[in-house]
Image (tube, rainbow, N blue to C red):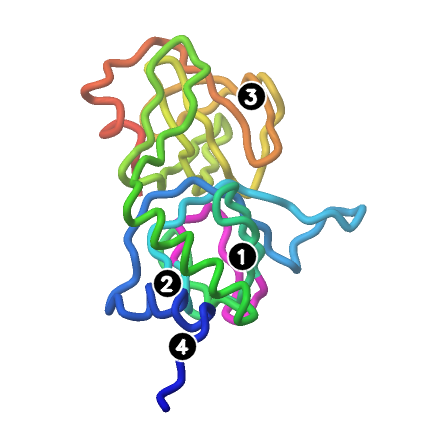
Amino acid sequence: MPQTPSPLAADIAIVERRPEPLIIVIPARYALAKRCDANGNRHEWACRIVKISLHAMTLFAPVNGAIGDWVIVHWDEFGKLEGSITRALRGGFVMALAATDEELAKLAVKIEWHNKNKNHGLPDSRTHKRIVPNDPRSTLFFADNSRRKCFIIDISASGAAVSAEIKPDIGTPLAVGKIVGRVVRHFPTGFAVQFIQLQNLDSLEQKIILS
């Protein structure tokens, strides 16, 4: 008699049948296992999951690791995903996922659920409407003429939430792309910049997203 597929195999097959990774836009946070502070605590940065399958995941991220580096990604709905970097991208990387069969089965169900329920908006606590840019990669410019690549978590007419390899002191003047502002707040994965002037939403993304 033919064997009945196990629930585990059936769950995994949900996504295995899909020939291409699921393309999504999901805000998350991540850490590189080798990147720690003086106390041994891992640094965390904001990122965006843009593709995911049972085998690999593509992230837009402000800080890249080397090929083979271990990555820990946290997303409230997917939980913790871990794996190693297999390819570097401009402003991100591809990582191979490491998981048990049970973890893969759970991931398969979550991926399928997201494919049917694509509502990834973030709660908005600001006075001005918050926008998640299509391309989150930008550049910070400082008063000493130095610059750093950064990741834009979200933007509004009055400011931006930014994640970068550095976390400037509160009060630091800088420009995010072409828009001048000042660091006003720190949070675990980055910092908030308040623009000197309110911006027009129609041209905001064009001004702030620079390669």
Q: Residue at x 37, y 63 (%)?
A: 53
Q: CA distance from mark 2 to mark 4?
A: 21 Å
**163 magenta-colored:** no
The residue wearing badge 4 is: 5
Q: Secondary structure at mark 1?
A: strand
Looking at the picture, tell me which residue is in the foreground, 209 or 26. 26
Looking at the picture, tell me which residue is in the foreground, 84 or 204. 84
Q: Is 122 situated above or below 91?
A: above
Q: Amino acid at mark 4?
A: Pro
Q: Disc 1 or disc 3, which is closer to the eye?
A: 1
Give whichever of discs 2 and 4 has the lower sequence position.
Answer: 4
Q: CA distance from mark 2 to mark 1?
A: 12 Å
User: Mark 1 Cα within 10 Å, few/some/many (few <14, many 20+)?
Assistant: some
Label 3–label 4 contact, CB within 8 A? no
The residue wearing badge 2 is: 53
Q: Amino acid at mark 2?
A: Ser
**67 magenta-colored:** yes
